[in-house]
Image (cartoon, helix red, strand yellow):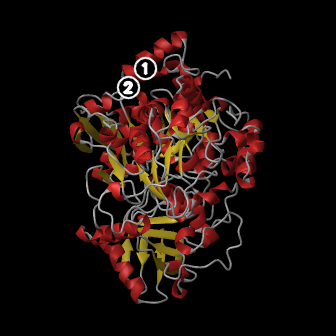
Amino acid sequence: MAGKTLYDKLWDSHLVQQRDDGSALIYIDLQLLHEVTSPQAFEGLRMHGRKPWRLTSSLATPDHNVPTTVEERKSGVNGIADPVSKIQVTTLDDNCDEFGITEFKMTDMRQGIVHVVGPEQGATLPGMTVVCGDSHTSTHGAFGALAHGIGTSEVEHVLATQCLVQKKMKNMLVRVDGKLSPYVTAKDVVLAIIGKIGTAGGTGFAIEFGGEAIQSLSMEGRMTVCNMAIEAGARVGLIAVDQTTIDYVANRPYAPKGDHWKMAVEAWQDLVSDSDAEFDEVVVLNGADIKPQVTWGTSPEMVIAIDQDIPRPEDQADPVTREGYARAWKYMGLEGKKTLADITLDRVFIGSCTNSRIEDLRAAADVVKGRKVAESLKQAIVVPGSGVVKAQAEKEGLDKIFTEAGLEWREPGCSMCLAMNADKLGQGEHCASTSNRNFEGRQGFGGRTHLVSPAMAAAAAIAGHFVDVNELVKQ
Amino acid sequence: MRPFTKHTGIAAPLDLANVDTDMIIPKQFLKSIKRTGFGKNLFDELRYEDEGQPDQDCTGRPLRKDFVLNQERYQGASVLLARNNFGCGSSREHAPWALDDYGMRSVIAPSFADIFYNNCFKNGLLPIVLTEAEVDQLFKDVEANPGYELTIDLEAQKVISPSGAEFSFEVDAFRKHCLLNGLDDIGLTLQEADAIEAYEEQRMKTAPWLFQARSL
């Protein structure tokens, strides 16, 4: 019999009940909650007179709606100018108080984007099942945890039962061999993967990312890769546990301590796919071939390397692709443009659950240090992923580097990634963004998003247009 | 949950691949803390020329005339025909809530994104996967015949055209059971409370760190 994949092992260790019809009851160890997808779930509990099954399995923090200016943040939830956003954040606070769920409220320095906060606090641990009403929950798979996004009905289901009804997914291995070139980051790797397999390439699969290029990434980089598994259609992204994982988790506030730590570390050694495990599909990339990536269109799969020409609709053989490209060209205003450098940028956003961790901020600061943001830009903002990231960055003086270069230094939250707060693009504006989705209207009505790494966003901020960061740093 | 057994309704063709959940219901409408009222903002950016605001009265907003649901012949549509990878992107259940609130009972496409597909079943909305060739055929038939209605029979797992042509589809047995009977699956899972407790007891021995109370 073939060995087990990491996904198989995680599935088996959380199986409460296998049913005859192929569905299964899977136990959930950790549920993260935020203000957007939880109110209707709590309301459902109240309507049926149900209580959370196990309180210690939940952790909440507001992130999508929170303002990021110092002024608005001074007085906590009362400082939110948008009355509708304020109600949503207040509702989360009230629900967590009523049901007894641990919440990092807006004034808590541990507040931040759920997918930054969970790992940072050691709430996310290897071998867990982790869910959240947010598709980017795949992020936590970087720890060898089975993590995926769910809808609000399932948020309620997990609160009430600690379980989910699931069907097992198929196994895919995406192996990135060899070493990465300078300034080619985790973000470039995952964008290149999406470019190769497409936004539906991983539908129905749990993707395990492996190979030398993945193993050599830090935990921050691994989180960036798993974060965007969903952009390749896979709800679940996974990376095997190794010493890098264990070193990151050690001594985090919620990480196991003493004997429990020793016991946990021993158990975590098994969180790798067996050498004879069989995958339903294997995709291989060569790390050395990957160059800095930039999306040109309105889907993450519409991505090219910085030195490539923007693909034209008329060159596409498939009619549905041609139609999609034509629509994207029109929306993105690409008529008359040949390369990425021809696009004049209006704004730059460095942040989001994909790229707002300390390493991301260091990479961006390293590029802008001693340089100035292009005068043609309307705005460039840096939004740390959590209060803890913000404090660390300030300790290292990164905030000063950003503000001296002409970037704004903000308070933590999801911010311009999906523009539920005041940070958004105007109609027709182009933005170099370290976020995860370039869908129509995602960052604001009529806004045009180009996804890039923090280093590439920083380089674009300096040049005012896209440029290979390797070229910029030589100047 | 409202049961789904058999439904006949006007089909509307949305001829666009990779329709994401930001398109189905843009983010500004996610600020609601209710499950209802999203229908008027379904496909807001495709449907209206201006930028929609939460709690806005949408009557009188300028419509995009070329958008399928704004065309006279598709008024009252309750079956949406769509292309590959429908519902990709965010996990927002507001997407099926908006489709449902608008009056859609079923979406037919060659493929769906996983989370969206799953969310539909929780809301009495039936996502149906047919082959690309079948969906292509339906697109042609719908466009050629005003007032074209499709019948969906969940028990028989068939989509039936006005001419009597039948298209079979697959659906997971448990989901079908819940949808046919309008069952609340939380109640069903709670019937297995003993099994969940037994799992926890066993797991507490092998992985006790997962059950530790956290100090604030």
Q: How many marks?
A: 2
Can you give x and y, in whole percent of width and height, for residue A142 in the image?
42, 33
- Identify residue type, mark 1: Ile
Give the quarter of the figure containing the C terminus of chain A.
top left
Look at 60% across and 45% down and name the residue there. Answer: A155
Q: Is residue A75 above or below residue B139?
A: above
Relative placement, left or right, of A226 versus B216 is left
Q: Is residue A213 visible?
A: yes
Q: Is residue A162 visible?
A: no
Relative placement, left or right, of A204 versus B216 is left
Residue, disc 2: A241
Residue B100 or residue A216, whichever sits in front = A216
- Identify residue type, mark 2: Val
Give the quarter of the figure containing the N terminus of chain A.
top left
Look at 48% across and 21% down and name the residue there. Answer: A249
The dot on residue B85 is: none
Q: Are the residues at dot 2 and dot 1 in contact (C-beta closer than 8 Å)?
A: yes
Element at badge 2? loop
Residue, disc 1: A246
Can you give x and y, in whole percent of width and height, for residue B117 in the image?
47, 58
Q: Is residue A426 above or below residue A185?
A: below
Residue A400 or residue B70, whichever sits in front = A400
Label 1 Cα crowd, 10 Å radius (few <14 / some 14-19 / many 20+): some
Relative placement, left or right, of B205 versus A62 is left
Q: Is residue B110 above or below residue A213?
A: below
Look at 54% across and 46% down and name the residue there. Answer: A134
Q: Chain of mark 2?
A: A
Look at 61% across and 48% down and name the residue there. Answer: B186
Sequence-first tag of 2 and 1: 2
